[in-house]
Amino acid sequence: MNSSITVTNAQIPMLDLGLQHSSIRQEIKAAIDEVLDSNHFILGPNVKALEEEVAGYCERLFGVGVASGTDALILALRAAEIGPGDEVIVPSFTFIATADSVSLLGAKPVFVDIDPITFCMDPSQLNGKLSRRTKAVIPVHLYGQSADMESILDFAREHNLKVIEDNAQAIGATHRGKRTGSMGDIACLSFFPSKNLGAYGDGGMVLTDSEETARRLQSLRAHGTTKKYFSTEQGWNSRLDEIQAAILRVKLRHLDAWNQLRRSRAAYYERLLNHVSEVVCPKTADGNEHVFHQYTIRVANRDVVQKRLSARGVASTVYYPVPIHLQPIFQLLGYTEASLPNSELAAKEALSLPIYPELTGEQIEYVVEVLTAALKQ
Ligand SMILES: *Cc1c(COP(=O)(O)O)cnc(C)c1O
């Protein structure tokens, strides 16, 4: 019987940044060398150029480079005047930073359920979350696909709410022809290494069309100073450095090609998994172009399936095992099990498979073979 088991050394990671680096090594080295020779390490010409290039790419007038995606959210919320006593509606099924940036400013995150098809905020649930204190909504473009921004923006306009897009996972995606990050009042990007546009360290950016907001953000990232050693309000030290900006400028030139490769990898998964009845493949909503930051399926018995994949060298990750309304840090808000059923079910069923531009067709076939065997076992 043993002869039917293929012995393989295959190790398929979630992401292979080493492979990506080897394809751009010379460009990156030249860019870093230039910074090292320039004597300018923080908020210099590369940061300024990157701000313009990323803002342009995301169809925005202004970009403000900061130290991380989390800081981008905190500074964006502060620039939107969110503080103690305010409520901000956020999806429960997202990375913790979307919500704890709100509570760090003394405001209250109010959790809304997701659309089970896209995993993004369900606009039809927003009305039930509204109160006199609601000031803003943070849609998250989860896994690389836009939330239903048309409905969210309509709702926000009707109720005079600010919209802050959490675009950490979806740079380059579009919704009805518009780039994610171009639609809300303010948008946030993360350049964490594993993101579709990732630095070799931490980084982030805030995007806006308002010159006044951009100025405010520039002040907030530098201790609330409007000119040197002259502080008008409390701020942060949240600056983007020149080496990361120089690296990101190189990578930005490759982003469209990489996103296209991610889409073709996703299409191949879909073709192979379509007839596997136990698997629900990710769906792209009408009017959206997806950039597949993650390729996230749904399966029953997810944790068992994940162990079996791991035993045969196939990495997979659960984004996210606990919906935020049930996280210990938000216990005081009083949410109970079954209060946001779609988020809770997604936390039980979602499984992200390896996806990255360099992933080969053979590797995808192996992942699907191992997954299919795991489901039948
Ligand atoms: C990565 C991420 C963030 C935070 O970005 P950092 O750069 O890691 O601080 C925020 N929101 C979402 C949805 C993310 O995926």
Image: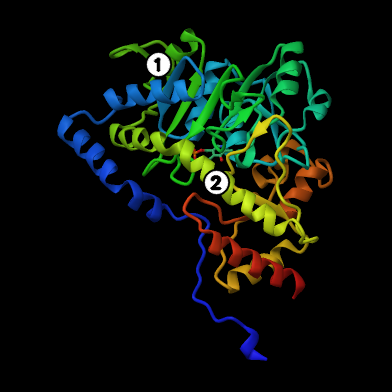
The front one of 33 and 25 is: 25
Residue on which the image places disc 1? 219
Mark 1 crowdedness (10 Å alpha carbons): few <14, some 14-19, many ≥20: many
Q: Which kind of residue does numbered mark 1 sit on?
A: Ser
Q: Nearer the viewer, mark 1 or mark 2?
A: 2
- Classify residue 138 as left or right of residue 20: right
Q: Position of residue 207 (x, y in %)?
A: 50, 21
To which quarter of the image does residue 106 belong? Answer: top right
> Image quadrant for the N terminus?
bottom right
Secondary structure type for disc 2: helix
- Classify residue 301 as left or right of residue 234: right
To which quarter of the image does residue 44 belong? Answer: top left
The front one of 107 and 158 is: 158
Q: Which kind of residue does numbered mark 2 sit on?
A: Arg
Callout 1 touching callout 2 (CB < 8 Å) = no
Residue 235 visible in rendering: no
How far apart marks 1 and 2 lie (CA) works out to: 37 Å
- Marks 1 and 2, the one that precedes in the sequence: 1
Residue on which the image places disc 2? 262
Q: Position of residue 339 (x, y in %)?
A: 83, 41
> Which of the numbered marks, if any, corresponds to residue 289?
none
Residue 72 visible in rendering: yes
Image: 293 above or below 150:
below
Does any atom of ligand 1 lie closer than 8 Å to the CB of label 1? no
